[in-house]
Image (cartoon, rainbow, N blue to C red):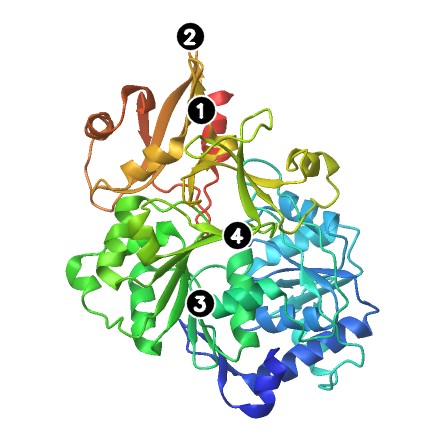
Amino acid sequence: MHPGIHAESDPDKPALIMAGTGHTVTFGDFEALSRRCAQLFRSRGLRPGNAIAMCLENQPWFLPLCWGAHRAGLTYTCLATHLGSDEAAYIVSDCGASLYVGSAAKADVAKALHATSPGPRYWLMLDGASDGFESLEAAVEGQSAEPLADESEGADMLYSSGTTGRPKGVEVMLSGDPLGTVDPRWEALGALYGMAPESVYLSPAPLYHAAPLRFCLGFLRRGATLVIMERFDAEEALATIARYKVSHSQWVPTMFVRMLKLPPETRAAYDLSSLKIAIHAAAPCPIPVKEQMIDWWGPILHEYYAGTEGNGITVIDSAAWLEHKGSVGRSAAGEVHICDEDGNELSAGETGVVYFGGGNDFAYHNDPEKTARAHHAEGWTTLGDVGHVDDEGYLYLTDRLAHTIISGGVNIYPQEVENLLVTHPSVLDAAVFGIPHAELGEQVHAVVQLVSGATASKAELLAFCRDHLSHVKCPHSLDFSKELPRQPNGKLYKRLLKEPYWR
């Protein structure tokens, strides 16, 4: 199961369409380009198991490059485009990349890497060569479009968002299976979400993240057409659904919030009737937000909880969620265990660290200490989240363990406060965290981004919290920010907000 099969049967069918420009890559073009990319990597001496790194914005070359590395049996690391040169240099070195691909749009980072990173032997630049860089287009053009004789399944080696510390790479164990061999977990997800050749899948998030990248390749394997937004915009997302008759899509809760904040007449202006499946993940979705989305789009929302680590997954559809509001579902791979800080398993209804057992094991690349901290004595593994299960086995997430505020000896989970604040009509985004307090150790603090033109005061928002939450959970102080440091995948760089208060 791979795009080449569909290139043979329907070469002129669109494989991917860039939403902003309409630029289209057919399955025939995608197959030829990915073959040439694979030949390029092999011509530079890269063999199965070797690594490449790339830092590209959402654009037509992104997925053919990834699939070219994949069919050459390589590991490929996609760097977030917002990274500074120091963070990017760490990842390029840590992943062991022998070849680096950058773009003119991120030339500053590419040039800094070239000057400081001794690992890669080959440096290529898209959209214009630069000193020390070979033109990617020219290098690929000179390659054969024949498939490699030894094609095998490669894999991505992606790094965590780094929202609570240095990014962590998830170790890759290549199977060596022939190209086209599909992981049974993706077979199951494909069946669950109805991935099919007639699907039109909208990807509004950066492709360097695990879910957008893996779901896009999963849909391509099945012959579906991808519609890729260069960057997310709330109204343009609705227009794209209507324009391309999108049937499947994937979102993060912050995107829902931004679409719901659009004026009612704007939301009503677009025909969304083609949309059959709307998947969301990456962060807990506030209950009122999901209720409004189901009221608007119908019971087509499907949520899952999983991580780049691939150690387990829970899933839930709209019907089950309406019966278990706030849940991220029941396990579809690996059983869920809730444990206290000493590793003792807790009963249903008790809050603790969420572990998966019986699923895939994982390790963090070059970091045995972080790997050990993610493992339980029973062999279970955790992504570092806190939550509980009910009597029916439905999982409810509370927050990230690393985000817990300990104030006066009481554990406070900021996600609940953030979920409340974004329901205020004047609030577009919110972050809650602990700041130093002489007596309590930490005090609950909020930073809020207002909707454009809104004039809500600090006193109004603090009173709003007190009206809906117990006193101990409420922020004692609040600041405003023009924009919170949130990644397009929904992850918030909370440590960047906290640091000034803790200096």
Q: Picture coordinates of residue 383 (x, y %)?
A: 57, 41
| Mark 3 touches mark 4? (CB < 8 Å) | no
Say whether disc 2 or disc 3 marks the residue closer to the N-terminus: 3
Q: In this view, does 432 lie to the left or right of 273?
A: right
Q: What element carries label 2?
A: loop
Quarter location, residue 71: bottom right
Q: In the rendered image, which residue does mark 2 sit on?
A: 439
Which residue corresponds to the image point at 34% horizontal and 36% vertical from the top-left? 418
Q: Is residue 428 left or right of residue 36?
A: left
Instruction: Name the amino acid type tagged 3.
Output: Tyr
Q: Picture coordinates of residue 220 (x, y %)?
A: 54, 75
Say whether disc 4 or disc 1 marks the residue closer to the N-terminus: 4
Give the CA distance from mark 4 to mark 1: 27 Å
Q: In the rendered image, which residue does mark 1 sit on?
A: 405
Q: Picture coordinates of residue 481 (x, y %)?
A: 34, 36
Q: Is residue 135 visible?
A: no
Give the CA distance from mark 1 to mark 2: 14 Å
Q: In the rendered image, which residue does mark 4 sit on?
A: 313
Q: Is mark 1 on a helix, strand or loop?
A: strand
Q: In the rendered image, which residue does mark 3 sit on?
A: 193
Of circles 2 and 4, which is in front?
4
Give the CA distance from mark 2 to mark 3: 51 Å
Which residue corresponds to the image point at 54% horizontal and 36% vertical from the top-left? 164
Farthest residue, direction right: 45
Of circles 1 and 2, which is in front?
1
Q: Is residue 109 left or right of residue 236?
A: right
Instruction: Name the amino acid type tagged 1.
Output: Ile
Instruction: Name the amino acid type tagged 4.
Output: Ile
Say whether disc 1 or disc 3 marks the residue closer to the N-terminus: 3
